[in-house]
Image (spheres, rainbow, N blue to C red):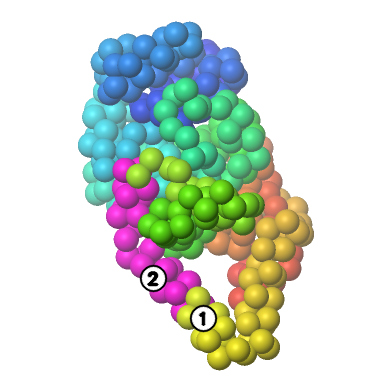
Amino acid sequence: MVGRAGARMRAAVVGTGLIGGSVLLRLRAAGLDVAGWDPDEATRRQARQAGVRTPDGMVEAVADRDVVFLCGPLPTLPGTLLEVAAATPAGCLLTDVGSTKAELAAFAAERGLTHRFVPGHPMAGTDRAGLTAALPELFDDAAWVLCPAPGPGLAAFRRLAALLMEVFAARVVPLAADRHDTVVALASHVPHLLAGALAGAAERSPLRDAVLSLAAGSFRDGSRVAGTPPERTANMLLGNRAEVLAALASVTAFLDELAGALRDGDRATLTARYADGRSARAALAARPTAEVRRRFPLAGSAGELRFLHELGAAGGHLHGCRTVGDEVEYLGRRLVVETRDRPVPPLG
């Protein structure tokens, strides 16, 4: 990747835990000039031992960079964004990897940073934590949400999208920030609640040891993310509280239907509800898509933003973004099968 005036792109990562560390290692593997920083001194030592330049001060790490990834805990991101914006050149691209987007996107807009800050969220991770758990291949073919803003924000979005696709081999999913928070509440955040509830109930069981000794794939799969560091999970849930509670209500209503059918001995309803769940599960493995190719003026337009938002909302993603003359060309894929009772909206 090249940065200013054809030079090697200079990147920095602030916060080098599991996600930030994986970003750091991938950037280094791709040949970028990369620096890292973490508030924890031991983590900084680990990064140095891995061969990554890691100054003791954050300002030194981000100075004169072309792109900076903000990867600290959710509550720290607004303050870190302001610090990094003040310490970097006006053309430096800024993004984050937090699991909620609307609040930080609004914060950046209020402070006039949408021309260089693009909210982001890679949908990847493990139940481990820290730089020692980082994997440079973590984002291969992963969905990486970006939230494009109108006007100058579109140019920043294009730059970052191209970087993510080229360096991380990620599928870029463009979504409005508020739509992102609604989607991940059910796709990611409620599963953390359910996993915690399942594992927590086992922990409280008077037959705990027997339960855990017999725990097979269903328990292990269902409780996997309960192994996530508790503070990180709490930050995520509280950061998206309203949307998570709304999504949890829909899950609770469905669970009540299952429980009611079980109490009543209603085999037909129980079977029907599980057929609904099986259909969604099967769709995870079989999602037929069609190629999408669209061009827009480099100056940016409402039509471009609408296309991007609709593509992500329809379950699609980008796999290419390039400049062709005085236009930008997007290559992507979108679902071709309409979800039952939820027609896919038109693109652009």
Is residue 152 at least partly visible in the picture?
Answer: no
Which residue sits at x=53%, y=86%? Answer: 263
- Mark 1 residue type: Ala
Q: Nearer the viewer, residue 276 or 263?
A: 263
Which residue, given by chain and number where applicable, does mark 1 sit on? 259
Label 2 secondary element: helix
Residue at 69% across / 76% down in the picture?
A: 275
- In this picture, is 277 found above or below 153? below
Picture coordinates of residue 148 (x, y %)?
46, 49
Q: In which quadrant of the rendered image does the N terminus lie?
A: top right
Residue where numbered disc 2 is placed: 246
Task: Give the answer, above or below, for where 56 lies relative to 244.
Answer: above
Q: Is residue 268 left or right of residue 79?
A: right
The residue drawn where x is 63% and y is 82% is 270
Magenta stretch bounds:
231-254
**In the image, what residue occupies the spot 29% across and 28% down?**
84
* Magenta part, dominant SS: helix
The x and y percentages for residue 71 are 38, 33
- In-image side of 324 versus 227 (left or right): right
| Amino acid at the residue labelled 2 | Ala
Is 265 placed above or below 305 here? below
Residue 167 position, x and y percent, is 60, 28
Does dot 1 land on a helix, a strand or a loop?
Answer: helix
Neighbours of disc 2 within 10 Å: few (<14), some (14-19), many (20+): some
